[in-house]
Image: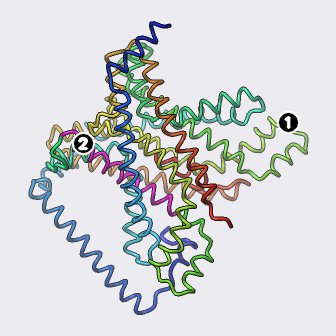
Amino acid sequence: MATSTAQNVLFDVQGPRARRVTLVLNLVGVLLVAALAWVVLGKLAEQGQLDAAKWTSLFTGRTWENFLLPGLWQTLRAALLAVVLSIVFGLVFGLGRLSQLAPVRLVSTVVVEFFRAVPVLVMMIFFYLGLGRAQLVEPANVPFWAVVLGLMFYNGAVIAELIRSGVHQLPRGQREAALAIGLTPARSLRLVELPQALTAMLPSMVSQFVVILKDTALGYIITYPELLASARRLGSGDGNILQALFVAALVFVVINYLLSVLAAWLSRFLSFRTAGRTKLSEGPLAGEDAA
Amino acid sequence: MTDYLNDFASLFDQYDVLGAFWVNIQLTFFAAIGSMLLGSLVALMRISPIASLRLLGTGYVNLFRNTPLTIILVFLVLGVWSQLGINLSADFNRNFFLYAVIGLSLYHAAFVCESIRSGVNTVPVGQAEAARAIGLSFLPAARLVIFPQALRGAITPLGNTLIALTKNTTVAAAASVTEISALMKTMIEFRPDVIIAVFLTVALGFVLLVVPVGLLTTWASRKLAVKR
């Protein structure tokens, strides 16, 4: 998406002179980047960080079998459960905020706003130490549940907001037509508005899954053995921590990038199937995935 | 009940809760400036006429938006600091603080860039066309016509990014900065009797930090909106 309509008009189609200038600037830019890379790589080589041994060990079967794949599995396991639980949480409180009953609306609003304001890490630390003391789950599973619960409360609150704004963004006619054919407000919500709102919000929800996957890395701080933690263990053992972290980051980037592509594709594909807007990252929640 | 409250109050004598929050506020302040500068630059690159700059900007955003902040901070501290031995400050704590500011700035710059780009999309086509028609080339048009309007249109997403940044300063615990989430861990470990109160205090602190930012951006985005 390098050029959209709004960007095309920012500058004229370049003439011969501007193209020459651009070419020169591009060359200068490439040279600058190359020079910078040369200095950085030189420094790294000086410190022996580019030695083949430090990199090749990362692409052996032993490394992936014992460290990276188990770490990735722990990451995905926590992320998947957190996705399912936050959708449930989001549905309950999102519908709560749309309820006809004022007390239900009030409680849902307070719950959603509270959990959106508290940092995920703070919740994870609380559950990590709290669950351990309360002895509700097996000691070995405490970090896992702390990660899942922390992610559920924050992302569930965000999804609740997505659902609410999805319903609000539908054209008024949808609800009016449903009421006109004799549906009650609750049935109109359930049969007409919610299905369309969910379809419209699906792309944004997939973007939120990127946030969930990224935030599982916070589990590193509370001793959950996810991908980052296993990469660190691997790196400390083999003396190539820089390289191990680099590979772990790369795995995250690839998975999240694919999810983002899926979200963009969904937003185009689904726009025919709902009266709502499927447009990605617009509106009040746009910056939300910065978390 | 009064016993519990007394136990709770003694926490504030024992631990510097406000001092720890102050570290988070400082992290937010410096990282906000850093990410705003870097993010504006990347946004400018992404809307520029030069293809290589657009590519570089897109690459930056895709890389940093999809990497967990925790990895960035751990990479800076364990990789860049401890492996490469690059010291940013002779003072041990200040060194970690600076690394945390750099990591937070790098990460949030990607989101600032996307916020500004969404602001650019709110500027009507006619504005850019008019700027071109009176003979402004790309940089003057961007500086004098597009960016002033785009920034005002981007207040809400920028505010959301600032809120996310405020909360994400807790991740600096991964870079060995003693801020509030690290202190909370210590407090609960040594004073498990008041665990709920400790959590609620920290949570309330963040509600107090975040809610005014939200209200302020809502107010500012209405006040400064370009009337069309």
- Kind of residue at badge 1: Thr
Q: Position of residue A243 (x, y in %)?
A: 21, 49
Find numbered disc 2 in the image and state the secondary structure of the residue it sits on.
helix
Span of residues in magenta: B92-118
Name the residue tied to disc 1: A184
Judged left or right of residue B189, residue A192 is right
Q: Is residue B97 magenta?
A: yes
3D distance between C-alphas at marks 2 and 1: 59 Å
- Kind of residue at badge 2: Phe
Find numbered disc 1 in the image and state the secondary structure of the residue it sits on.
loop
Q: Is residue A150 above or below residue B175?
A: above
Judged by its main secondary structure, the magenta piece is: helix
Which label sits on residue B69? none
Q: In front of the other: label 2 or label 1?
A: 2
Q: Position of residue A287 (x, y in %)?
A: 52, 51
Chain letter of disc 1 in the image? A
The answer to whether residue A74 is visible is no
Quarter where residue A63 is shown: top left
Q: Is residue A16 above or below residue B222?
A: below
Name the residue tied to disc 2: B96
